[in-house]
Image: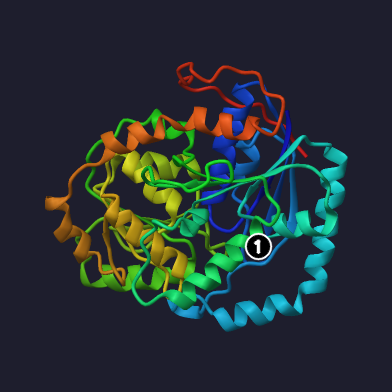
Amino acid sequence: MRIVFLVQGEGKGHLTQAISLGQILTEAGHEVVGALVGKSPDRTIPSFFEREIGAPVFLHDAPNIIYNKKGRGINLPKTIMTHLGSLPHYLKSLHGIHKTIESLTPDLIVNFYEIYGGLYNVLFRSGIPMVCIAHQYLLQNPTFTFPPKSSIDRKFINFNTQATSWLCKRKLSLSFRPMPVQDPKKHLVVPPLLRREVRLLEPHQGDYLLVYMTHHSLSKHIIDWHQKHPEVKLVCFWDNRHEGETVQYGRNLVFHQINAEKYLHLLAGCKALVTTAGFESVCEAMYLGKPVMMVPVPKHFEQQCNALDGVISGAGISAKSFDLSIVLDYLPRHQDQSARFRSWYMQGDNMFLNAIEDFGHGTVSHNRPMPENKSSKVYHR
C-alpha cells in the first residue's frame, strides 16, 4: 500500500507516533510516500522528524494553541480569535494539502490528529480511505474517566476531536492500558506508538530529575523552584528558539533544545520524569519504569485528562504546579508498572497492521516476532 501521513506538528507526540508507525508499515512491505505536517510561527518542526520519518516531508501552515506569557497556560480567547481571522489562509493550506495528496496517489491516508483531516474528507471527497490515530480519540470512549465538573470542556474537546476525523473509516485510540470498545469496526483501543529506540535503552538510576515541557514559557516555574532548592540536579528540555542549544542556569540546572537522542538517553538514567502531561512522554517513562509527575498546562483540559488517566494507569502522580518537592516525596512509594505496560505495548504492531490493512491490499502475516531495530529509509525534499 502507498500511504500518506497527515501529522499535527504541535509538540513531539504526534511526530514520534508517525515515525513509529512508519517503521511498522515499512517493515511489513508498505510505503509511506509522504508526511504532511502542520507548522506555526511559534513552532519549529524538530530536525529528528525529517531525518527519521523515511518519506518526503511537506509543511503547511496550521492552527496552533496560543499561550499566555510567563507560564500562565493557554489563552483560549486569543487562540480562537486569531484562527478565525486566519481562516482564508488556512483554506489555502487545505487546497495545498489536496494538491499534494493528489500528486502522491496514496491508497490510504493516516491522520495523526491534524485538524485538516476531517475538513479534507468533507470538502474534497477524494474517496481515499482515512484512518485516524491519536490518544485524544480515547476521550470519546464511554468508559473514560474525566476530571470532575468538566462537561463543557468535554464537549469542546470532543467536538474538536470529531472534526479531525469526519468521514474517516476507523479511529485508533492510543491508550496507557486496554479498555473496552463498543464498535471495533469503527473505533479500536490500541497500545502507544513508541520509538523503537526506546526498546534498546537500558534503564538505570541517575542523580537528576528530567523535565520536559511543551512550551518554553513554563520554564519560569522551574527556575523559581530551583532558586529555592539549588542542591537538586535538574535537566530540562524546551523548544525555546530564542536560546542556544544548551543554556546553563548555575551548576545544577540546564535547559536543552528538544533533541530526540539526547532526551531518550537522559530519560533512561533519570530518577523521575516531570512533564506537562503529554501522552507520549508519559508512555516512554512507563516503558522504562521511570516515575512521572504530570503537571497539566493551566487551562489545558486535554492534559488534565491525560494526567488523571496516567495516575489511574500507575504512571505516577499529578500536580498543579512545578513544585518538584512533590515528586521527591513520592518516589519512595512508587510502584513500577513497566512489566504490565510492556506487555500491552508489545501487542501493538499486529493490531496496527490488521487495523490499517483492512482498507488496503496487505497480505503480510502479523504473527511473527517484532524485529529488534531496523532503520527506515530516508528521503530528502
Amino acid on which the number 1 mark rests in the picture: Ala
Depicted 177 relative to depicted 329: above or below:
above
> What colour scheme was applied to this rendering of the protein?
rainbow
Q: Quadrant of residue 57?
A: top right
In what quadrant of the picture does the C terminus appear? Answer: top right
Pick whichever, 151 or 322, lies toward us.
151
User: Which residue occupies 60% across, 66% down?
Assistant: 160
User: Seen in the image, is 232 located left or right of residue 321?
Assistant: left
Q: Position of residue 64 (x, y in %)?
A: 62, 67
Pick whichever, 378 or 296, lies toward us.
296
User: Seen in the image, is 232 located left or right of residue 57?
Assistant: left
The secondary element bearing badge 1 is classed as helix
User: Which residue occupies 71% across, 30% down?
Assistant: 360
User: Seen in the image, is 148 located left or right of residue 39?
Assistant: left
In what quadrant of the picture does the N terminus appear? Answer: top right
Q: Position of residue 167 (x, y in %)?
A: 71, 53
Q: Quadrant of residue 145?
A: bottom left
- The answer to whether one can see residue 73 in this image is no
Q: Which residue is mark 1?
A: 163
